[in-house]
Amino acid sequence: MQVKVYSVAQINHYIQSLLENDFVLNSFWIKGEISNFKAHSSGHLYFTLKDTSASIQCIMFRGEAEMLPFLPKNGMSVAICGYISVYQKTGQYQLYVELIEPLGIGNLALCFEQLKQKLEQEGLFDADYKREICAYPKCIAVVTSPTGAAVRDIIKIIKRRNQSVKIIVVPVLVQGEYAADSIVQGIKLANQWEADTIIVGRGGGSMEDLSAFNEEKVARAIFASETPVISAVGHETDFTIADFVADVRASTPSMAAEIAVKNVVALAEQLQYMESMLKNAVENKILEWKNRLEFVMQSHVFAQPLDMTQKQTIEQMQKRIQTKMLHCLQTKQMQYEALKKRLEASSPFATLKRGYVLTQNEKGKTVTSIQKIQKNDALLLHFQDGIARVVVEKIVKTERSFSDSGKEKMDL
């Protein structure tokens, strides 16, 4: 009888078929603690599931891993749904994971905490990025469900506080599978309309109902908004990721409306009160200064403004001023006389007094040389006491010499 010999691959394949066709092992839930967790670059997740006495190798393929709303970590207690199969290459059986549910803490709560920690580390919650809400907006965009009670409360309160504010309702889904994408688009649309303030929110509900406002894509859309955002999700005790990212968190939608718009009626009353207070203050101040003026007018100083000592002081000051002014005038007079003498000494008229004559041609130009005149030229001779007009009959060029006595001799 010939013995049949199997290959390793055949045996591993046979064991794989047995395990995968087993009624229990082809789909079951198992609980334990995660250890040796590794997220591979391929997108697959590898880890060990253990309890106090045993362990099993687990793998979660990328397709299933991408559907996880949270990231598993070492030490986390979880319940896993999957099936047992054999990795034929090594002959090792392992648990192929399809679903993971955290134990002790809800799935949504875990996702919330992980996303909150992630965004906080990135700085999306930092106060430095928070912007001031417009104090007197002209237009407010409300990103919410168009049929909920929240939008009605917001519109009613805004109109009650300021009738002139324009309200744009951006209808979005606030619950369900497509709510997060709808909210993101609503925020982008509100920015295109250039509203002064955006209110994003909805009425109260369970954590599952508010889950859209805990989505990362919604948080990043709020952070990227160019217009300041007020988050108004749920009741006062409800907190969402949107609340932490927004510029201002309102405890309720109604409170968001009160934050966004000031009560102009109350402001008008306040201004009227302040005007009245200011008017009274001015009138009281005028009355106070009037009384003080009357008191001063009736005082001894105004009745006898100057005593003898003050009069003597003033007279002495007047004398000193007069003395200084007289001295200054005398000095200026002396300076004037000296300048006058210097001017007279340098004047050509002073030369004329000594017997010299100033000669000019008919054009008024001074003749300084015999070379500049011709026969029959008319000349003007300036004496100290008058002017004579002469005609040149003869021109004689001479050479001048002076005797020892200083008298000039001229040879004609």
Image (cartoon, grey):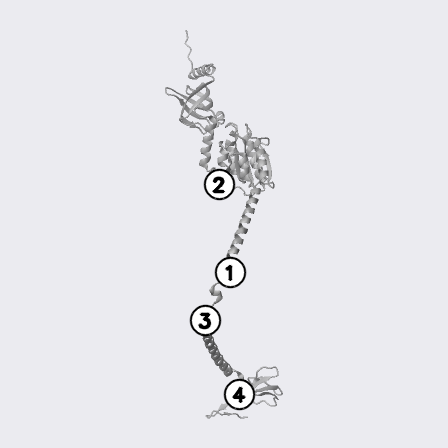
Instruction: Evaluate if marks 2 and 4 touch, with contact meaning CB atoms under 8 Å apart.
Output: no
| Front residue of 49 and 374 | 49
* Mark closest to the chain's N terminus, 4 or 1: 1
Q: Which residue is mark 1?
A: 294
* Mark closest to the chain's N terminus, 2 or 3: 2
Given the current orientation, which residue lies at the most extreme top position?
1
Q: Which amino acid lies under the numbered mark 4 shown in the image of this protein?
A: Lys
Give the label, 1 or 3, closer to the camera: 1
User: Quick check: can you spot residue 88?
Assistant: no
Q: Residues within 10 Å of mark 1 (few under 14, many from 20)?
A: few
Q: Which residue is mark 2?
A: 129
Residue appearing at x 46%, y 37% in the figure: 122
Instruction: Evaluate if marks 1 and 3 touch, with contact meaning CB atoms under 8 Å apart.
Output: no
Q: Which amino acid lies under the numbered mark 3 shown in the image of this protein?
A: Lys
- The Cα atoms of the two marked residues, 2 and 1, are separated by 60 Å
* Mark closest to the chain's N terminus, 3 or 4: 3
Q: Which residue is mark 4?
A: 353
Q: Quadrant of the C terminus?
A: bottom right
* Mark closest to the chain's N terminus, 2 or 1: 2
- The Cα atoms of the two marked residues, 3 and 4, are separated by 59 Å
Give the label, 2 or 4, closer to the camera: 2
Q: How far from the left and from the top, in percent, is residue 314?
A: 45, 71
Instruction: Evaluate if marks 4 and 1 touch, with contact meaning CB atoms under 8 Å apart.
Output: no
Q: How far from the left and from the top, in percent, is residue 391?
A: 62, 88
- The Cα atoms of the two marked residues, 4 and 1, are separated by 77 Å
Q: How far from the left and from the top, in percent, is residue 22?
A: 46, 14
Tag 2 secondary structure? helix
Instruction: Evaluate if marks 2 and 3 touch, with contact meaning CB atoms under 8 Å apart.
Output: no
Q: Residues within 10 Å of mark 2 (few under 14, many from 20)?
A: few
Q: Residues within 10 Å of mark 3 (few under 14, many from 20)?
A: few
Q: Which numbered disc covers residue 311?
A: 3
Give the label, 4 or 1, closer to the camera: 1
